[in-house]
Amino acid sequence: DEALKMVREEGLENRIKRHATCAKAFRAALKALKLTLFPNEKFLSNTVIAINVPAGVDNSKIVEIMREKYGVVITGGMDELKKSILRIGCMGIISEVETLLTINALENALKEVNYPIEMGAGVEAAREIFRS
């Protein structure tokens, strides 16, 4: 199986470390953009980054803009969280490149729906994690 071969070549410890680094970069970016994580930090995952949707922002519009304009697929929540969170996958082949592209697309989508952010702040915060 090709996926198993890729895991073996990279090594499980390296793969787990890569996912943790990308998740840390996402979290730094979101903090820089003044977005809050869901759930609280005690329960954070390195494989799915969940964000509380800011008041007045339609999460389905963010998902649509990111997919259609930037080719980046994220999703909203499920059930009672359907409209209140955004979820970003952070596993598999994700690397610095995909992380930065996703953050950039999120910044642009937030700007497009008139959410006040400092453009580039998230990308720069994530880059700092990858540099360290």
Image: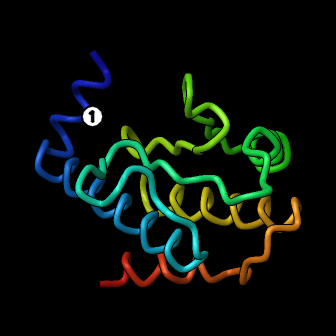
Between 49 and 67, the residue placed more toward the observer is 49
Q: Residue at 61% across / 75% down in the picture?
A: 33
Q: Quadrant of residue 6?
A: top left
Residue 47 sits in which quadrant? top left
Q: Quadrant of the N terminus?
A: top left
Q: Is residue 129 above or below residue 35?
A: below
Disc 1: CA contacts within 10 A as few (<14), some (14-19) or many (>=20): some
Q: Residue at x 77, y 38 (%)?
A: 60
Q: Nearer the viewer, residue 110 or 15?
A: 110
Q: Amino acid type of disc 1?
A: Met
Residue at the far top: name it. 1
Q: What residue is drawn where x is 80% and y is 68%? A: 115
Q: In the image, residue 8 lies at what x, y percent?
A: 15, 35
Q: Nearer the viewer, residue 128 or 59?
A: 59
In this rendering, position of residue 42 left or right of residue 51 = left
- Residue 39: x and y in percent read 38, 50
Q: Is residue 52 left or right of residue 6?
A: right
Picture quadrant where residue 25 is located = bottom left
Which corner quadrant holds the C terminus?
bottom left
What residue is disc 1 on?
6
- Residue 47 higher or lower than 107, as above or below: above
In the displayed structure, does residue 125 sit left or right of residue 63?
left
> x, y (%) of residue 104?
67, 66
Which residue is at a point 56% across and 34% down the rendered structure image? 81
| Count of numbered tags | 1
